[in-house]
Image (spheres, rainbow, N blue to C red):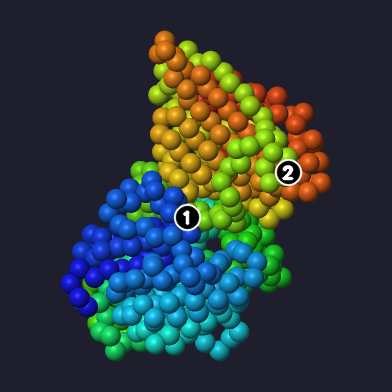
Amino acid sequence: MRENALCLVTGATGYIGGRLAPRLVQAGFRVRCLARNAGRLRDVPWAGQVEIAEGDVSRPDTLTAALDGVDVAYYLIHSLGRRGFEEADRIGARNFAEAARRAGVTRIVYLGGPEPEGREHSAHLRSRAEVGRILLDSGVPTAVLRAPVIIGSGSASFEMLRYLTERLPVMVTPRWVNNRIQPIAVRDVLRRLIEAATLPLEVNRGFDIAGPDVLTYAEMMQRYAAVAGLRRRVLLPVRALTPSLSSHWVGLVTPVPNAIARPLVESLIHEAVAHENDIAAYTAPWEPTPFDEAVRLALRKLRDVQVETRWTSAAGRDASAEPLPTDPVWSGGSVYTDVRSQPVNAPSDALWRVIEGIGGEHGWYSFPLAWSARGWLDTLSGGVGLRRGRRDPHRLYVGEALDFWRVEEIVPGRMLRLRAEMRLPGRAWLEMYADPAPDSTATYRQRAVFLPHGLAGHAYWAAVFPFHAIIFGGMARNIARSALPSPGPAPGPAGKAHSA
């Protein structure tokens, strides 16, 4: 491979891609990131160290420029949690394989899942395996890294393990908790991905990558409890708990919604143990991270608020939606708005700190029962609910998830725009402004926008509008009040949305 090689990282807005890109830079590579919306990478700490290209693997014409001059292409895209994800993954992989071959890419690296032997795979693992085969047959030397459960702060698998263990000291368990798994620390996954960039060009195959410990899921829960300082958990096996029922149960107990929980649970019905460690023959020797240490590191990152990326980093189902409509009439349809303002006897920077800290543990500053009820309704209808929380209690960046919103735009110190990702008969946004006044005070402005879809959308707005004075009016007043200086200990926000 030539010196100062150029790596393309697809899925750079996701959990693994968002961590891999800066580490490739640290390792001496030039890095280009592919995103459907370049704006979603605008605020990440390493944005100035990489090139950003807009493109979509479902649209082959957008891949030519992104792959121009690329030596190593990382394929970190999957459609987990979306309807028809197998077909979407198949089309995306074929488009990318052909575009990489035409561009003269010298190596593709793909992060897939385990391939159990002797049993029918779940749809999730079957799709991962098919994508690997498509890339291996592309004519471009490809390394497929097959990873089992990934243990790291913010990963969906770790959040599932964490919440199941911490919230349920006594738990009925399905049969799959007794299947053997060889979990791997996220830091080791990243190291293997970087090493794969320098594999000899004649290498075109898959590799198992895993940690040193082979455990059942039940043992993982007990070991997690020990590391976290919790009492040993009581597990009551129930054979009748099917993967489908298990996923609903996981969706209720953990922040992971059913659409993500189901493929994760279906993957756990298979044993996921490495059958070889052949990749070690091509790399310098190093010791993989033990399970207990991986958990300890993840918990430390959570405690110190140093979580780089979370499973919620990946684009939501409305990621390709148009930006906020600004005209009273948009594309021939109605746009409903709720606009409020509140004077604040405090500087705008104090107001901005309250605005940027909204959501998650801080709550939404009004009628917590209403926010919680809306979150539960969304969860029960298969949506994301309020449980995603936020990555950092104080800072936000464009593209990250915030409860059942997605951060769409930030003007630091002035404006925060959120796009709704709860299930709605239409599309919705919430804007919050900190406007400075000449006398060193500020005005808080708030605008909720709803673009209805069909009659159901109009009916929905009519049904919720009577509650806006309580919810949005109270929100404006309480945010303004929370920005005021306090002579004593700062009071908590007026209304905490949830405790997850």
Quarter in which the C terminus is drawn: top right
Left or right, 96 with reference to 168: left
Residue 83 image offset from top left, x and y in percent = 65, 66
Q: Residues within 10 Å of mark 2 (few under 14, many from 20)?
A: few
Left or right, 108 with reference to 334: left
- Residue at left 73%, top 40%? 334
Seen in the picture, residue 465 relative to 205 is either above or below; the reply is above
Residue 42 image offset from top left, x and y in percent = 39, 48
Q: CA distance from mark 1 to mark 2?
A: 25 Å
Seen in the picture, residue 324 relative to 219 is either above or below; the reply is above
Seen in the picture, residue 315 relative to 129 is either above or below; the reply is above
To which residue does mark 2 refer?
333
To which residue does mark 1 refer?
37
Looking at this view, is 327 or 398 the one in front?
A: 327
Q: Quadrant of residue 248?
A: bottom right
Left or right, 327 with reference to 288: right
Q: Mark 2: which amino acid?
A: Gly
